[in-house]
Amino acid sequence: MRNIFALLVTVISCTTASAAMTETCQKYFDETDKFLSQMKTTGVAEEQINLMKQQYEQSKKQFSSLPEASQDAACKQASDALKQSMNAAGIK
């Protein structure tokens, strides 16, 4: 479970968003929202979930100035890593 948490923190930390969010990023953030909402069922402590949510929100703000091409590349990579985390946690 700690490996899943560490992987998710890494994924969240390297993601991006924008006020004019690309479709790729919107899909990724929707998937991340779903993942975070389902983390309680996997036995992850509430404190860790809250930390992940905070980092997730910070990452959205940090990368808001990236150009669309950079957003797409970052969100595609993050989405792929998120899918691995979801599979490892048993979340579909």
Image (cartoon, grey):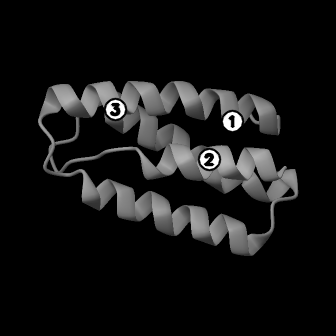
Q: Amino acid at mark 1?
A: Ser
Q: Please, what secondary structure does the residue beneath circle 1 have?
A: helix
Question: CA separation, marks 1 and 2?
Answer: 6 Å
Left or right side of 76 for 50: right
Contact between marks 2 and 3 (CB within 8 A): the answer is: no
Say which residue appears at 34% left-offset and 32% top-offset. Answer: 74
- In the picture of the structure, the residue carrying the numbered disc 2 is 8
Q: Position of residue 50 (x, y in %)?
A: 62, 71
Q: Is residue 42 left or right of residue 64?
A: right
Counting the numbered discs, the total is: 3
**Which is nearer the N-term, disc 2 or disc 3?**
2
Helix, strand or loop under label 2? helix
Residue position marked by numbered label 3 in the rendering: 74
Residue 57, given in percent of the width and then of the height, sits at 41, 62
Q: Amino acid at mark 3?
A: Ala
Give the residue pinned by disc 1. 85
- Going 49% across and 49% down the picture, which residue do you hit? 12
